[in-house]
Image (cartoon, rainbow, N blue to C red):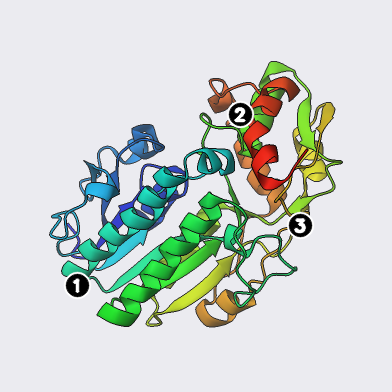
């Protein structure tokens, strides 16, 4: 057994499970805290025989300050939370409860355990309809409750850093993608939508003309960035993590291959997301290593895992996004 202990909240989820992979590979004992509302035990199944991995089922909103999960831990990586735009518009209280108050609980547990560093999974959605490339000092302008809740969680982390001297860093994640990305639930994740449509032989539902681009960053590169942010002597820092190389939705469709049907553009969505990653490259020596083409190829090799994903079409998407249009100014 190792004496290096890390806690990963939301460690059975998409990014969290890849964080577990990286930490175990670097010789850490890893304690996962997850209520399995979004994560899946199967994401950790390949580590089932590893004595350095433990899974504690629990909700961060009920986490006790003296939680045994955090005892003796040196690093905490806080991924637990809820995502998606439309549900946050419909259930803002739930988002504030989980992403803000839940973060307070995690911070208190980390503080009482006297951890060496907590790294918070922040969201680039805090920038809103941002100028690009987007630096960390860009004005904050969240467009919907999910974005606000993640930013308030980030602010809370730095308040604990200021008041309680808890060593904290935050990483604002741009457009994460990769294996184990969520396959079920609310409409939103473009890969899950497109892969299921591919399997079903249905056209891809493309918003607008498909020229909009996103700074897609592969999940294992994200996990490496978090490890660097945890192991650095720096604290009180915010870093963007993206590829710094936006890819159009049309290019994604070229890589997957299939027909297209177009949907109306949506309010509150930027035409481009583009991370300026100069700060993390300079300060932590981190750079992305997985090209978009390679990353999509890795996912396509496992496309059968999207067999049980919901199949979306223009009608069902229209119903799912009614609140989005009505609330954020669409017609």
Q: Which residue is mark 2?
A: 303
Q: Nearer the viewer, residue 247 or 36?
A: 36
Mark 3 surroundings within 10 Å by alpha-carbon count, few (fewer than 14), some (14 through 19), many (20 or more): some
Q: Quadrant of residue 249?
A: top right
The kind of secondary structure element at disc 2 is: helix
For the question of whether residue 286 can be seen, the reply is yes
**Percent x, y of residue 178:** 57, 44
Q: Residue 168 versus residue 301: which sits nearer the camera?
A: 168
Q: Secondary structure at mark 3?
A: loop
Alpha-carbon span between mark 1 and mark 2? 43 Å
Q: Between 321 and 250, which is closer to the camera in this rendering?
A: 321
- The number of numbered badges drawn on the structure is 3
Q: Which mark is residue 272?
A: 3
**Where residue 120 sits: x, y (%)?**
41, 63
Quadrant in the picture for the N terminus: bottom left
Sequence-first tag of 1 and 3:
1
Nearer to me, 58 or 303: 58
Q: Is residue 245 above or below residue 295?
A: below
Q: Residue at x 34, y 58 (%)?
A: 103
Residue pointed to by mark 1: 114
Q: Is residue 83 above or below residue 312?
A: below
């Amino acid at each position: 057994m190792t004496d290096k202990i890390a806690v990963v909240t939301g460690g059975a989820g998409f990014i969290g499970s890849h964080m577990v992979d990286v930490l175990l590979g670097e010789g850490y004992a890893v304690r996962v805290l997850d209520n399995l509302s979004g994560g899946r035990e199967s994401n950790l199944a390949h580590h089932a025989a590893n004595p350095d991995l433990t899974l504690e089922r629990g909700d961060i909103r009920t986490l006790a300050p003296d939680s045994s999960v955090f005892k003796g831990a040196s690093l905490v990586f806080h991924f637990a939370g809820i995502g998606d735009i439309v549900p946050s518009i419909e259930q803002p209280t739930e988002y504030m409860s989980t992403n803000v108050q839940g973060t307070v609980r995690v911070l208190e547990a980390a503080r009482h355990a006297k951890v060496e560093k907590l790294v918070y999974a922040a969201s680039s959605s805090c920038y809103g309809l941002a100028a690009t490339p987007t630096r960390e000092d860009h004005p904050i302008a969240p467009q919907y409750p999910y974005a606000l809740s993640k930013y308030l969680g980030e602010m809370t982390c730095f308040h604990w850093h200021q008041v309680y001297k808890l060593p904290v860093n935050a990483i604002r994640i741009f457009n994460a993608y990769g294996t184990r990305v969520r396959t079920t639930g609310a409409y939103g994740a473009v890969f899950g939508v497109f892969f299921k449509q591919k399997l079903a032989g249905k056209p891809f539902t493309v918003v607008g003309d498909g020229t909009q681009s996103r700074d897609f960053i592969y999940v294992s590169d994200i996990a490496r960035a978090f490890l660097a942010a945890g192991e650095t002597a720096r604290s009180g820092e915010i870093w963007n993590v993206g590829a710094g190389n936006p890819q159009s939705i049309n290019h994604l469709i070229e890589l997957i291959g299939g027909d297209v049907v177009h949907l109306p553009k949506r309010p509150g969505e930027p035409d481009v997301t583009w991370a300026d990653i100069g700060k993390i490259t300079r300060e932590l020596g981190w750079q992305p290593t997985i090209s978009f083409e390679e990353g999509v190829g890795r996912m396509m090799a496992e496309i059968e895992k999207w067999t049980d994903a919901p199949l979306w079409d223009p009608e069902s998407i229209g119903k799912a996004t009614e609140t989005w249009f009505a609330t954020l100014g669409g017609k």
